[in-house]
Amino acid sequence: MVKKISQVANKNVITSRDASTAIVSGFIGKTNFEDALEQLATRNGLSLRKDDKGYYVFELDNGNNQALQNPNRGNFNNPNQGGRGNNRPGGNGNGGGSGLANVQIGADSLGRPQIDVDATDAPIAQLIKDVSDRTGTNYFLFAEPTGNISLRMQGVSYETFLDQILRGSEFGYKVENQVYLIGSRKQEGLRETRMYQLQYRTVKELQTFIPADLGQNVEIKEFIDLNSLILSGSAANIAEVATFLDALDRPTPVVMIELLILDVQFNRETRAGFEAGLATEPPPAGGTILPSVNFTFSSEAINRLLGTLAGNGIVNLGQVRSNFYATLQAVEDDGYVITRSKPRLSTLNGQEANITIGETRYYLDQRTTLQGNQNPVTVQDRRFTAVNADFTVRILPVVSGDEHVTLEIEVSQSDFIGLLQNDAPPAQVNRSFTSNIRMLNGEMIVLGGLETKTVENTGTGVPLLSRIPIIKWFFGNRRRAKNKSRLLIFVKPTVIY
């Protein structure tokens, strides 16, 4: 009767444990809700009170209505019968069958009820009623749980009993004012709202990791301001989601990656030859003799040398003009350059870390267009276009449980080569490699392989004569150059919790 009143009036009406089996009768119409409940209580020897939560509670009036108790109460599992209870049909759609159940109630050292249940294909609703009556627990059924169950539990509390017997079903419970409200998990009176605040992880996109079947009965909202999730649903479903979040909310390792980048460059260049010509004005004599030879002979010095050769009877080549000059060159340059940088990157486990070091050059991009048909006008568009040469390192660290770190490393390098030509983009060379390695926390490895070699052998001179050995040095200039560049990268990951 109470269940029907609650459903029709959409108000919470419950009974005390002693009044739950009382039989009432009466007809009341055309009056307000509270007056109707008071008249129904008065005519059947009951009392009515309204608690601070707005629940209407029927109670026995000083125990005077014991004669109204249901005489069949306790037949499901009467403690005086001992052993197994009597077979009892499920009834009311609760299971469509019959079963056996034996319930024993004890107490722990603090006097709290301890329940022993041994049931075989027993109706769930009747089993809840019997255990609640035997333990003296106040309860209210919004809807009777359906189905039968077989179970055996010893020395469990009332809440543990409810948790296990309702697990996996669409029914749940909620405790208010020491009254256990039992019904469908989706029912309004059993819904709860809880804010789950994360301690270690960020709430952003965490919702995508919750399994669909686990969160289908719980409404989940992100509350980024407090790094929390708002969970709304039944207490049992919320508890399942919270248990899963407890397993995810662990400290995330921070990986500090130390990089030592060495760019080693070695070059050797040799320039040798003899050059002669006519200048607009007589050039002065002079130049460098040591450590390299780069000396210019004036016409006077050359004429003295020619006069000496003619005076000694060797050969008479005559004299040169006053603006004549001759240059003798023999130069060798060696270079060895080491460029070192030590950047440090820090990132969370499983998140990328990137570093880019680059150089930007500009070249002139000029375009000429004609506008108009009758009197075309020439329009020139001049703009400077940027070209980048970058050194980029991308590292993705993954920390395993045994303190090993797996690194996915990508390195790319581009350099400018040659001289910049007018109105042309600078030439570039690109190098890159990818590596996957696994190493222990705190170890260091070296990555290499980005090496370039350049060999140049060029010369200018008089045709044919510049090819004859020995003589070619007097009729041309020769240039030989070797360049070598090697890039070494040292990587050391350190895991920080």
Image (cartoon, helix red, strand yellow):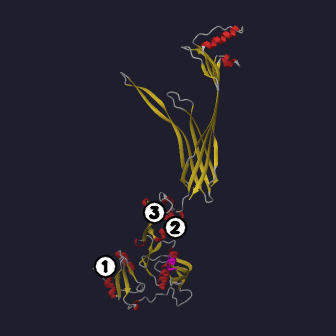
> Residue 399: which quarter of the image?
bottom right
Inter-mark Cα distance, 1 to 3: 40 Å
State the image coordinates of residue 174 (x, y, percent, origin top left).
44, 74
The residue that label 3 is drawn on is: 229
Q: Quadrant of the C terminus?
A: bottom right
Which residue was labeled with disc 1?
33
Front position in the image: 303 or 351: 303
Q: Is residue 474 above or below residue 314?
A: below
Tell us which disc is closer to us: 1 or 3: 3
Q: What are the residue bounds of the magenta stretch? A: 157-162
Q: Quadrant of residue 319?
A: top right
Disc marking residue 243? 2
Helix, strand, or loop for circle 3?
strand
- In-front residue for pair 265/149: 265
Does residue 141 lie above or below 401 as drawn? below
- Give the camera-side residue of 114 and 132: 114
Residues 52 and 110: in front is: 110
Q: Residue 124: x, y in percent? A: 50, 78
162 up-or-down from 86: above or below: above
